Amino acid sequence: SWASSTVPQQQPGDSAASLANSMSNLTAIIEDIKTAVDSTSPSLSPNDKRMLEIAQDCKKAALDLQDEVNKYLGAVSSAKGRRIKSFWVAFESRARSRAKLVDKLEKRLQTHQNTLETELLVKICSKADAARLCQQDEFKKLDDTSRDFVKRFSDGETRVAALLVQHSESVKVHVTKETTAVKDHDSSLRQDMEKKRERLVKSLKYPTMNDRRNQIVDPHAKTFKWIFTGPLVAHSDTDTDSDSWEEARGRFSAWLRDPTQPLFWVTGKPGSGKSTLVKFLVDDPRTRAGLTSSESAPRDIVILSHFIWSAGQAMERSVRGMLCSLVYQLIDENDPMGDRVLEKFPKTKAKDSCSDWSEKELRSVLRLLLGDSSKAFCFFIDGLDEISETDGQLKLIELIREMRAGSNMKMCVSSRPEPILKKHLGVFPTIRMQDLTEADIFKFTSSLLQRKLLDNSIDLSTTEYKTLVREVCRIAEGVFLWVVLAVRNLLVGIEKGDEMQQLERRLELMPSELKDLYRAMWIRLGAEKQIYQEDAATYFNLILLFNDISDTLLEESSFSTPLQLLLATDSNLADRALLTTPEPLPSDDELRTLANKMAHRVETRCLGLLDIKTWDTSQYEMKLEFIHRSAKEFLETDADGRAL
């Protein structure tokens, strides 16, 4: 049949659709050529009138067939949406009843097609007529399809099927060309959008964004696991009541599972391990498991964190720095969120660094991302009490209130129990770290002391060893930082060959309060205090000064290094670095040697209040940090610290 000669074999619905399309094309082409031929001959001969009548019959047959095919297509469309077997049976029966009618219409169209090929087209538009038509203005008024049809016919092609197939190929070439152009344009748009997205993400990140988190040491093995499971062992050597563990575990686990509880507060003394616990909770997979464990809990949850650090750079202790960190985490590796920001806030396309962002803009972006998302979010914010005085705790509390207002938000925060924070956070589920860490302190102290005793082949009876560990736990009162300093002191004694009595004496001389401990560490230097005090005072003041300068000039990249101390205290080296002396610049090896010497001087003169972080295997790049916020406070606010 004509349909089978021009349409590839397809599925029933697809074949019918192609056939219907071909009928429509054939009808339109016949009509256009008829109109064009009419315009070339002012009056028609009897033969011409007969030809036009045949053309009309052909058109009518095509329309009848097209109508029947459309009815079939409608039935197919309806059938595809049904899966009931009885419906398909009825549909197939109806299709068979129409088969004879379709066959009859197809044969009728075939008859007219043959007439067109052998007589009608030849008489309506002979090769000479077609050639003449191509030269006339009326030909130019035809659409591309009709002009191509006439052109091919004038060249000798008379088979309707071939004419349509050739036209189909030209359309295919044109469509392929246009599709390629569209794909190229789409690829260009995607690349441009990717560049804008990368620029946006880069503008939010500042160099010290993760410094505080990376500075927090990982918890000792098996510590803090009580937050999920309760005590692993009932330690008779400690005074901690197991009910405290069970209560804390139950309180935190219940909060994780309850989508209606917006906030959990971790509080405790300075150095009691709050930051270490928050980092542990962020990293432990049981946190996510708890958040998604209840039937009503969301399955798609995003965990974000930020660690405020008062002893760090300005951005590390500011609301703006926290907002940059959170927005960065939300859009990094999340293209739809980044695209949403660029679409809603077009001006963000021009931002290059975090200094280009205002706090107001960051709040608006965070509000958009949290409000538009179908995901749920859980924030872990550490060190609320360490926010800068410029921003203040009340501003931070207001931001937290705004963030937790959404139904898809949860937030775990930590801080010292300062009055303002206690007033606003005390109404939420809470744990006090110093009440819960005694067993962890026992594990930590036992592990370090036992290893050192074995390394030095010291034979301490079980009773003596446990007595020493219990004494550390008692004096520590839940403050992990004190334990670290105390164990460090005990290890020095063990290295020097101290007997048990001498080790106990060391503990007795260590104050339980951190500031008292810092003061005692300085006093213990004895005669060396007079030798080292000037150097220590110089180093402490320089590092505090560097922190102040970074707030206004170098807030995004400044930190204290041994090399900075060298340049500030060695005028000859500074002159060489500034090229104000004929002496050559120091070589890398020379700078490395000088930096290592300065690092050693800091260790021996600064009482252990400064920690040296090395991130380059060459031992050349080092960073100086206070071991704890309380150490910085001791130097700035305590009378003995200021005197030092």
Image (spheres, rainbow, N blue to C red):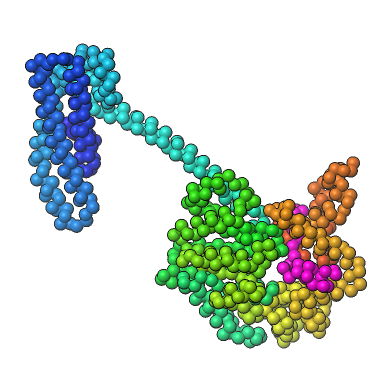
Give residue 332's position: percent from left, percent from top: 54, 53
Q: Is residue 44 visible?
A: yes
Per the rendered image, the range of residues in magenta is: 616-644
What residue appears at the point 67 percent right and 79 percent down from the top-left corner?
Answer: 478
Give residue 246's position: percent from left, percent from top: 55, 82
Of residues 434 and 449, the one nearer the viewer is: 434
| Rendered-image quadrant of the N terminus | top left
Of residues 280 and 182, the one nearer the viewer is: 182
Say if the magenta span includes residue 622: yes
Q: Disc count in the image?
A: 0
Of residues 339 and 610, the one nearer the viewer is: 339
Give residue 223's position: percent from left, percent from top: 62, 74
| Rendered-image quadrant of the C terminus | bottom right
Q: Is residue 90 above or below residue 480?
A: above
What residue appears at the point 75 percent right and 58 percent down from the top-left corner?
Answer: 548
Residue 188 located left or right of residue 518: left
What residue appears at the point 45 percent right and 36 percent down from the top-left corner?
Answer: 185
Q: Is residue 421 above or below residue 300?
A: below
Q: Quadrant of residue 449?
A: bottom right
What residue appears at the point 54 percent right and 56 percent down from the top-left corner?
Answer: 364
Q: Quadrant of residue 643?
A: bottom right
Q: Is residue 279 visible?
A: no
Q: Is residue 554 above or below residue 602?
A: above
Give residue 76's position: percent from left, percent from top: 20, 47
Residue 430 located left or right of residue 594: left
Say if the magenta span includes residue 558: no
